[in-house]
Amino acid sequence: MSAVNETLIRDVVAEVLGRIGGATTTTTRPAPTPTSSPAAKSDSCGCNAKRATSAPALRGKFGVFADANEACAAAQEAFVQLQRGGMAARRKIEEIVKALAEKNAEAWGKIELDETKIGRLDHKIAKLGLIKLVPGVDWLRPDARSGDHGITLEEYTPFGVVGAITPSTHSIPTLSGNIVNICAAGNAVVFNAHPSAARCAAVAVRAYNEAIYRETGIENIACIIEKPSLDSFNALCRHENTRLLLVTGGPMVVKAAMQTGKRAICAGPGNPPVLVDDTCCPTRAAKAIISGGAFDNNLLCIGEKQVFVLDNVADQLMQRLAENGAVKLTSAQLDNLTKAAFTFKEGQGGGCAHASVNKDYIGKDTSVLAKAAGVNIPADTQLLFAETDAQHPFVQEEQMMPMLPIVRVKSVEEGIALSLQSEHGYKHTAIIHSHDVENITAMARALDTTLFVKNGPSPAGLGLGGEGYLSFSIATPTGEGITNPRTFTRVRRCVMVDNLRIY
Ligand code: NAD
């Protein structure tokens, strides 16, 4: 197709979408700086007339909508605009999101903590400063083949509008990283955030859209439903513009997304076990366990949640934990905390009572947990720990608190078996501290997790102190792994028969 024809078709599509919106009015806001995209330059006289064909309901919202259907319509329109803006507009969006996340890290970290009341301010700020490590436009490289029968190009192309569900545990970081990935791949996105972390999410979405509009003329590339609910979740999932879902959250939302009939990329729950054997460096292991398990008060899905340690090094490991900022609870203190941090529902049919996490303690500071345990701790305590048995609720539940249960095991085999059981088949994350390659290999094979970290803290698995790239959405049950721009693309093949192979 010639460049002219392609341009014509895009213009017609934009105009038809504008008419479906039902109006041809102009915006009263100042005209945006035109994008520097060659595509945009070639098809525009600079008067912005064609950009002003949308429904007024979709204008001036900067991505924040009361109604899911309006958000989906606005995102679809933005998707078409992004196609016109080409790679330059995608690159600009990536730059803006990364720069604003860093610039506003302190302010946005604070509003997220004020709203959710979970996690730690220093780590909320750190998470936003890390958005620059999320892969963007440069990640998408076409694959080419050349042979006797000509050449073939496979390109990673967008779907259109992606519906994304974000968690309460890291609302702005997840949506920011998702925008980088999803828009780098040429898509638009509509978010249904967690109701308890939706106000801060809307602040960030508005700021991103204002800046993106100023620079590219695209207003609603990332939309959000202001007051999310199960109804808005259903409307977003059902909307015909929503081509793909990205769900980051616990088991209920993963199940709900899979029942929608839309393709869903699911970043589901975890309960990461740590195995410590007698070949590792106990000091290094203790420091890594504290660093990963205490991060943002253990809200990360990849965070260390329970430790299995060989009996002959257990005392040494606990000594090193205590020397490096963690405090050990006695068994009486552990009992007090367990009663506060879990509720126990009667088992059915005479079975055991089932523990579920008391939300009041999720993501709380060590001082809050220590108070419930009945112990005074130094103000700078990073982590609590206590010896437990393998069936203790702190081992079995994804507790998301800075309190790690330590379980003694007699052998590596027993440690692997208990790690596997406590991970509950989520296939999310597991960690080992060992210098024995056979132990490492055995655990990696048995656990079969998406992330497997050796001799470091869990965030090393996301490029933070280990090699690799960052995403706050790790697609576990559906298998896409650590999400990146390619996750949100359709692979399309273009074949030239018998020609253009140049040697
Ligand atoms: P959550 O499951 O309570 O909520 C996550 C999102 O799903 C929210 O937007 C919520 O409103 C929505 N939701 C919940 N139940 C729903 C339902 N039945 N129908 C429709 N929407 C529903 O989780 P949370 O407490 O916000 O976050 C913590 C959980 O998310 C943990 O299990 C954690 O492991 C997981 N998580 C996973 C990843 C990952 O990358 N795999 C990242 C962050 C968090």
Image: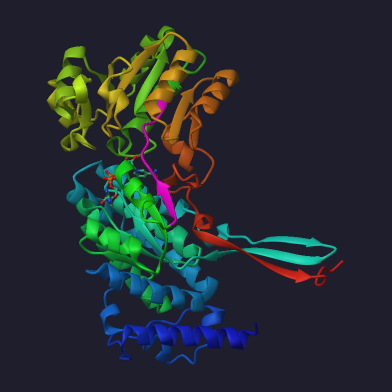
Q: Nearer the viewer, residue 262 or 232?
A: 262
Image quadrant occupied by the C terminus: bottom right
Give the image location of residue 394, x and y in percent: 27, 24
Report whether 335 appears left or right of 462: left
Residue at (55% x, 65% y) in the render: 157
Q: In which quarter of the image is the N terminus?
A: bottom right
Name which residue lies at 50% across and 18% down.
Answer: 280
Magenta range: 263-274
Q: Picture quarter containing residue 175?
A: bottom left
**Looking at the image, residue 272 lies above or below residue 352:** below
Q: Position of residue 435 (x, y in %)?
A: 55, 19
Of the pair 233 and 189, the residue shown nearer to us: 233
Does residue 489 show up? yes
Which x, y percent locates residue 400? 28, 34
In the displayed structure, 181 sits above or below 466; it is below
Residue 17 magenta? no
